[in-house]
């Protein structure tokens, strides 16, 4: 097997990530962002994803509101490593990046970018409760359901335990 480890800069310190072929799933945030960089990436089990990118404002050096991409994504592994493709309803690629994943940190190299960007595990993002179910989150040991509250996943236990012996 070819060593696919990479070295990325995180907050000014060099960090090694070993690409072991694990599947990235869940919410990943950048500790530091700059214009044009990814600030959040959410990959869900049903093949849908959410991407937030710090946008440029014409005529200003200040960041604008973040660009958001909510679409399907495709994950491809080949001899050169892992690749993520966010695609629209016409199956046209709207965002592409190479990636390395070590189980906690996700490093991405967006198309036409010169440097890898490190994203770390973050609290689960959502806009609807089904997003929580699709991120393979650990479920507490109580009957209940996921809720999406203020953009974050929260598990709500039922008030009464289910009677398993009717």
Image (tube, rainbow, N blue to C red):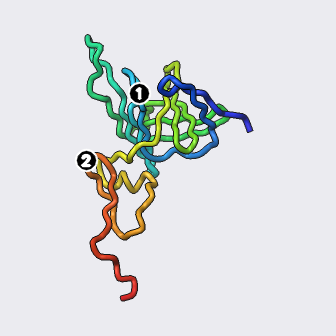
Residue 72 visible to the viewer: no
Spot occupied by residue 57 in the image (x, y as percentages of width and height)? 27, 18
Answer above or below: position of 140 versus 19.
below
The residue under the point 33% across, 76% down is 161
The residue under the point 49% across, 24% down is 111
Nearest-to-viewer mark from 2 and 1 = 1
Depth check: give the residue in front, 114 or 34: 34
Which of disc 1 and disc 2 is earlier in sequence?
1
The residue under the point 35% across, 39% down is 70
Q: Dot 2, crowdedness within 10 Å: few (<14), some or many (≥20)?
A: few
Please give the label number shown on residue 150.
2
- The residue that disc 1 covers is 32
Query: Seen in the image, is 97 located left or right of residue 134?
Result: right
How far apart are labels 2 and 1 at the CA level?
A: 22 Å
Answer above or below: position of 112 versus 105.
above
Depth check: give the residue in front, 107 or 87: 107
Answer above or below: position of 57 versus 120.
above
Spot occupied by residue 134 in the image (x, y as percentages of width and height)? 42, 53
SS category of the residue bearing label 1: loop
The residue under the point 62% across, 29% down is 6
Answer above or below: position of 150 versus 16.
below
């Amino acid at each position: 097997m070819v060593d696919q480890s990479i070295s990325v800069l995180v907050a000014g310190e060099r960090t090694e990530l070993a690409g072991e072929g694990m599947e990235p799933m869940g919410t990943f945030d950048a500790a530091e962002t700059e214009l044009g960089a990814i600030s959040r990436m959410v990959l869900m089990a049903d093949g849908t994803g959410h991407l937030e990118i710090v946008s440029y404002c014409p005529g200003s050096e200040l960041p604008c509101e973040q660009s958001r991409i909510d679409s399907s994504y495709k994950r491809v592994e080949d001899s050169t490593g892992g690749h993520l493709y966010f695609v629209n309803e016409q199956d046209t690629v709207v965002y592409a990046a190479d990636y390395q994943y070590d189980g906690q940190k996700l490093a991405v190299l967006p198309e036409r970018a010169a440097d890898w960007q490190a994203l770390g595990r973050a609290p689960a993002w959502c806009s609807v409760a089904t997003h929580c179910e699709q991120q393979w989150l650990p479920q507490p040991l109580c009957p209940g359901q996921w809720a999406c509250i203020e953009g974050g996943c929260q598990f709500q236990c039922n008030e009464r335990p289910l009677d398993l012996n009717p």
